[in-house]
Amino acid sequence: MAIDMQPESDRQPGREPGGREPDAPPPPARPWWRRPAVHTALAGAVIGYLLGHLLGNVIAGQYSQVVNSGQNDYAIVLGYVLGTLGWLAGLGVFSDLLRQMTGRPVHATEEARDASAGLARYFRYSLDHKVVGLQYLVGMIGFFLTGGLLAMAIRTELLSPSYHVFSSATYTAIVGEHGTMMMMMMSSLILGPLGNYLLPLMIGSKRMAFPRIEALSFWLTPAAYIVLLSGLMFGGFPFGWTGYAPLSVQATQGADAYAVAFGIMGISLILLGFNIIVTVICYRAPGMHWGRLPIFVWAMLTTSFLMVLAAPVLVGAMYMLITDRTVQTAFFTDDLGGSSYLWENLFWFFGHPEVYILALPGFGVVSEILPVFCRKPLFGYKVAAAGMVGVTLLSFFVWQHHLFDSGINPDMRPVFMLTTELISIPTGFIFLVAMGTFWKAKIRFTVPMLFALGFYFNFLIGGISGVYLSDVPADTTEHGTFFVMAHFHYTIMGGLIFAFMAGLYYWLPKMMGIRLNQTLGKIHFWTMFVFFNATFLPLFAVGMAGQPRRVYTYARSLETLNDWVSISSFLLGVSILIFVFNFVYSTVIARVHEEGNPWNSRGLEWQVSSPPPPGNFARVPVVLSGPYEYGVKDAPPVADLDPPLGVISNAYAAAAAEGAEV
Amino acid sequence: MSLAARVTTLIVAVLAVVGGVIFVVAHYLLGGPPTVDFAAATSGQVNVTMQTDASSDPATVPDHPTWVSYFIKSPASGSWVHTTLFQVPAHTRVNVTILGYDGSTPVRNQVWGQVSGTTGGVADYGGKPVKTVNGWNGPYLIQHTFAIPSLNLSVPVEAGPATCTTGPCTNNQHSTTTFSFMTPAQPGAYRWQCFVPCGLSYLDGNGGPMQTFGYMTGNMQVVS
């Protein structure tokens, strides 16, 4: 049922929980530097870190382990944890909670916060889902660019097998930072910005279910980013993004940064997923029943279940790793009674669903975009939703295919080979839906559509090579080579990033009221598509020839191919710069306003102005039909955005009186 | 907000973020130990002198003075440099002298007690050639190894008569291990490593100094 069903005008002004009386005078405005924002958060983080570090030195400074090793992991970990708490405290995350706990009025109601305008709100702990969505957007682009710069460093090193820009240790650390930045920090690439911004609009809600949790899920990500990057100050970590024990247990303090940052990001994922699940289930507008839910919302819902069920295992594993490194537990140390396999299983129990945490939102974005530019209903809507649910379920039963060559019980190999091959079936549903939608369609090749088509091309290669790798003999041959690397870059960069770009070009007019330059967008697409494939397709051959991952040198005979790949990757970087230029140019300098519905979409989010007004809808809409009825004769409008007063509450009251589920 | 204000805000934000990232990355990339240059070979040979110390003077090694560490003697200044990175010419004989200021740590696997890859297949302990050392019973005890796996070079380094904890040390209470080997014709970076797990208070002794440049692992850069 929809909780927020009462039309706005029916409400009587009242006292918000813990808030001021309606007629109470507003508190005096504080100067900007005393208002919680990024600058106070940074101050809180520094104070928290120093306090934690001091505490760690006081607690453990005299431990023989610390004295002998000269490495106080207690101080580092406590510094990171208290630094993160200080960061949040500086943002004012705990202010309202403390005020409510002590019976004092909060500084401002949610509505007052939402209504505050100006650039400054994007640097604050805003409870407006649209602000949080844009905060996520800028954050994710920043994380992506950082990871991309590290990728450029990797390809620079691999220009030659004998002349080295970096040492082998530095190269390994760069690879680890790149992988962790891309896999960990980018987990919320689509759900963070597009999900938080669009979900309430797409289901006819005025807000997310838990605005504070929503904001917290975002503000944890910059903390994780800073902690992760700070690992470089301690020499980095030598074990890639997978953090295999015992290497991660015995590594230097860069490993503390890895474990804490990943843990923080895991908490962020749990909060994000939990909030989306509750919002979808409880905050849908009247008439937005499950059969009318936009397919992108289905993708967000299934992804959120993955986040909520898989990320706790990750957080637990990181916690165990931290205790192994500090208080000398031995969860992952074989000769002390633990098991390094335990780490591998815990990590991949999260790690493989994580792949679908990245992929499913991409499926949702492109499936959402297809009908708009094909001007046809989405073919097999239920099949697409079922495919996403199927992928979600099966993704928890495939993780041991990452351990085929680790020495696991050989009897387990066929089981996980089968489950891995099975998951290609629901994944194939997404392609079937696309093929059916393309059939006899008059396709409009706009920039979002081009990126969506690029997604299908790339993900097909990534998916087929994945089926090949799921086969135990093939995996045994290619394990640890660039072939595997090429495979997952096709699924994640070729899939997720292309889908993200499609979504961004499609929804940015909605989110910012500004349309990205289409000519630059097309240049961006074609350069990115060509150089993405020029970069990663040859890596299948390089991998087949035996070049191992995470090693800074290789056989001389592979130098030409590697040079081709490196030069292509630099040009791929140029294509990303074209996007950055387009983004900055269009949103800051040129600013071509787009307030209507430029794509003639039937999506509910497009039925309100761009950007949407505070509260999204003047009244909670009544949804009348599905979002994909393009070309359907006599199709009713998507929703009644101005339902008569009392019609919703009366309908619910009548239904409740009859005992119906509402 | 005016165009000028938007652009100014953008520039400030970009500079702040880019500056922060560059600071971290530069700190990391430029923060490594220096490389000692032995590239000027005399009559086809270079002489490399190193020492091993149980711990170091905090004034010299502020990062991790408690870690076991190698030092390399600079041929230019004659001073001890806290590094494990050195550069030598290709296809050249390298005469290595290691002064041992650290105590004994028996090898866990006797394979590391064998000398391999050196000229003549031996190393000299105080002038006496040895091929295999029993690190548990003597007569020679082992403290560390100097090994370049890609060249099949592995030399157990004799333990010193006393333990010096204020490296770099200059007293005479040290062992002397000498050996020679040929650098390959192929230029490149050749990783070397101590294979006696000597990272005290790390899991299995393999953490900390064992995996950090400047201590028990490094690179031999071969140049043409």
Image (cartoon, rainbow, N blue to C red):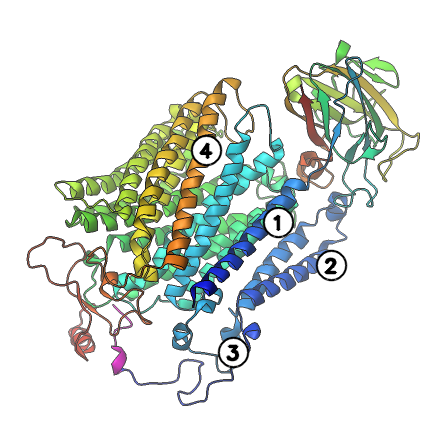
Tell if the residue under mark 3 belongs to the same chain as the one under mark 2.
yes
Extreme-front residue of the structure: B4
Circle 1 is placed at which residue position? B23
Circle 4 is placed at which residue position? A403
Extreme-right residue of the structure: B172
Residues at discs 4 and 2 in contact (Cβ within 8 Å): no
Q: From mark 2 to mark 1, how far is it between C-alphas?
A: 30 Å
Q: Position of residue B39 (x, y in %)?
A: 74, 22
Q: State whether residue A257 is above or below residue A410.
A: below
Q: State whether residue A602 is above or below residue A250.
A: below
Prevailing secondary structure class for the magenta stretch in the rendered image: loop
Circle 3 is placed at which residue position? A99
Q: Earlier in the sequence, mark 4 or mark 2?
A: 2
Q: From mark 4 to mark 2, how far is it between C-alphas?
A: 41 Å
Residues at discs 2 and 1 in contact (Cβ within 8 Å): no
Camera-nearest label, 3 or 2: 3
Q: Position of residue A306 (x, y in %)?
A: 37, 50
Magenta stretch: give its range: A1-10
